Amino acid sequence: MLGLFPKLLIDFVDSENGSGLLDDIFRAAGIPKSRGFRENKIYPDREWQRLFSAACVRLDIAPDLMEVAFARYFARYTRENCLSIYSAFLDSKELIANLRSVHRQVIEKYSNLNRAETSLNGFRIDAAPAEGSIIAIHYSSPNKLCRFLEVLARQVTRFYGDDARVEHTAHCMKRGDFECEIHVSWEETPE
Ligand code: HEM
């Protein structure tokens, strides 16, 4: 996983709780604080998972709620630092339909990684038109961040002022499925 993710999680915990708790979280995760996650380096998914779990335990917050809070923090970061990505799309439907290329751009923007290193990014996120004005997002990853995905998708539709619904279907990695399927649907505007 690109270091931007753990780096922002640490910033988030720090901004809410102060650095005393951070020492504790690093210790519980078995990661030296000197690790200093760099936004443009790739780290093992297992480190992210240990950091995330330790943060949930130490903050006494359920993992799903932590995903929600982190998604809001992450969305604010992207609005402030990744405007060029948003402005490349006309609306949220176009951005969501191109999630794969968004992440390709992100990985290129943050890193000078070669193809072999980039393939270490263990998640797959794809979007395809489903029925009517629905786009189905297919997401699989050892990190299982589908609640994060849902909230971020909602934040993105709000950013463009679009009227949309985000719904997690019954397919969910947290229930043992191979992938999560999340549907985003937009209100049809009458001609
Ligand atoms: C708008 C700008 C966006 C930026 C800058 C961004 C950036 C990133 C980065 C840096 C990662 C970590 C990649 C890695 O593992 O190496 C990531 C992962 C992820 N992104 Fe985005 N993203 C954006 C938009 C979105 C949107 C709109 C969604 C969902 C609708 C989304 C869903 C996810 C999910 C679920 C992951 C976690 C993948 C995993 O399981 O590891 N992202 N994103």
Image: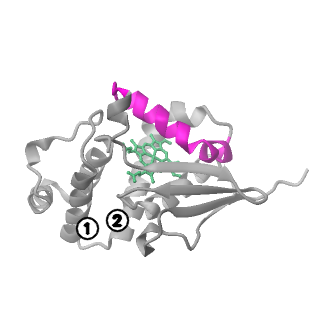
Q: Residue at x 34, y 32 (%)?
A: 116
Q: Position of residue 137 (x, y in %)?
A: 58, 55
Dot 2 lies on which element?
Answer: helix
Q: Which residue is mark 2?
A: 66
Instruction: Report the predominant secondary structure element of the magenta stretch.
Output: helix
Q: Residue at x 46, y 62 (%)?
A: 146
Residue occupying the far right of the picture? 191
Is 116 located above or below residue 94 in the figure?
above
Q: Magenta segment: does it hold 179?
A: no
What whole-number distance in Å separates the C-alpha atoms at marks 2 and 1?
A: 7 Å
Q: The N terminus lies in which quarter of the figure? A: top left
Query: What colouring method underlies this structural image?
Result: one colour
Q: Position of residue 70 (x, y in %)?
A: 37, 57
User: Quarter of the image holding residue 143?
Assistant: bottom left
Q: Which residue is mark 1?
A: 56
Give 184 or 10, whichever is nearer the viewer: 184
Q: Residues within 10 Å of mark 2 (few under 14, many from 20)?
A: many
Q: Which mark is residue 120?
A: none
Give 111 or 81, whichever is nearer the viewer: 111
Amino acid type, residue under disc 1 in the picture: Cys
Q: In the picture provided, is 108 more to the left or to the right than 91?
A: left
Amino acid type, residue under disc 2 in the picture: Met
Q: Position of residue 7 (x, y in %)?
A: 26, 45
Are circles 2 and 1 on residues that touch, CB within 8 Å? yes
Q: In the picture provided, is 152 more to the left or to the right than 51?
A: right
Is 71 located above or below residue 99 in the figure?
below
Q: Residue at x 19, y 64 (%)?
A: 54
Dot 1 lies on which element?
Answer: helix
Q: Position of residue 27 (x, y in %)?
A: 8, 59
Magenta residues, start to end: 91-114
